[in-house]
Image: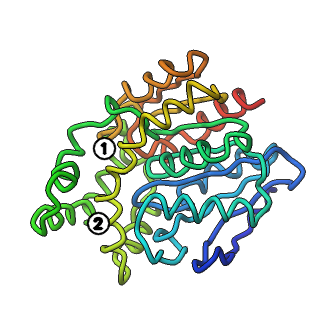
Amino acid sequence: MIDITYRTVAVDSINVFYREAGSRTAPKLLLLHGFPTSSHMFRDLIPLLADRYHIMAPDLPGFGQSENPAINSFDSIADTIDRFTEIVGFDRYAVYVFDYGAPTGFRLAVKHPERITAIISQNGNAYEEGLSEGWNPIQAYWQDATEENRNALKAFLSPQTTVWQYTHGVRDETMVSPDGYSLDSFFLSRPGAETVQLDLMGDYKSNVTLYPTFQSYFRTHKPRFLAVWGKNDPFFLPPGAEAFRRDMPDAVIRFFDTGHFALETHAPEIADAIGDFLG
């Protein structure tokens, strides 16, 4: 039996919810989720790894059970998660990044390369060739931040779009539990959530601006790196996964026949890949 605990910790002015599992003497593994979900996305993965690793999975500020931040930017999210790792005693750890968790985790790696033992990226992008045409409406808002372009992004927050993100590219949609997308839709409907998410879509351009910085970190420090990628992802394309080898020739790239939320259908396979990779 694996004991998973659920706690909230004050990180400066924000209460951050997190899941914790595994022995505190085991190697540390930080799990960072993406849009529009929460640490709930790791519900199947955590029990498969907690016998070997000390796992922390926070809800990013503005997501899940964590409070909304005063400033909705990826810099502020990374600063909060950086402080979170210090408060919970994660001084040296491997980091699993997905979607929005990738620019968060990569910022931590650039700031504290000595703390990172390995990186596992599940559809967590750092190269422009990884961005699909699905980003066009968001990029239009980056280029011209009109109210019309901002309002167009509200379609990404609808329950229908959330279900589509979970099921697109999946061989059998009956394998996808409704729990994940139903919970995400609930959190997206909370007061203030729309503003947070639209602000972050606008600020995602800061991540693309930082791609050369992230790539320089990869080239300079060459961290142990594993990509576990849903190859049918409509937002982050397989060339984005392959590109990591350009800066880290020893990176391990694994593709799975599924979509954006690969853990919904391939948690055991991804857990095995992580176990083989981390040892």
Q: Left or right: where does residue 67 sit relative to residue 85?
A: left
Residue neighbourhood size for the residue with mark 1, other residues' Cα within 10 Å, grouped as few (<14), some (14–19), many (≥20): some
The residues tagged by marks 1 and 2 sit, at their Cα atoms, a distance apart of: 22 Å
226 lies above or below 144: above
Quarter holding residue 225 = top right
Disc 2 crowd rating (10 Å Cα; few below 14, some 14-19, many 20+) is: many
Compared with residue 143, is residue 183 higher up or lower down, i.e. above or below?
Answer: below
Quarter holding the N terminus? Answer: bottom right
Q: Amino acid at mark 1?
A: His
The nearer-to-camera label among 1 and 2 is 2
Residue 52, position in %: x, y? 81, 43
Image coordinates of residue 160 in percent, x first then y, are 25, 61
Residue at mark 1: 168
Which residue corresponds to mark 2? 198
Side (left or right) of 38 relative to 55: left
Residue at point 25%, 66% (across, down): 158
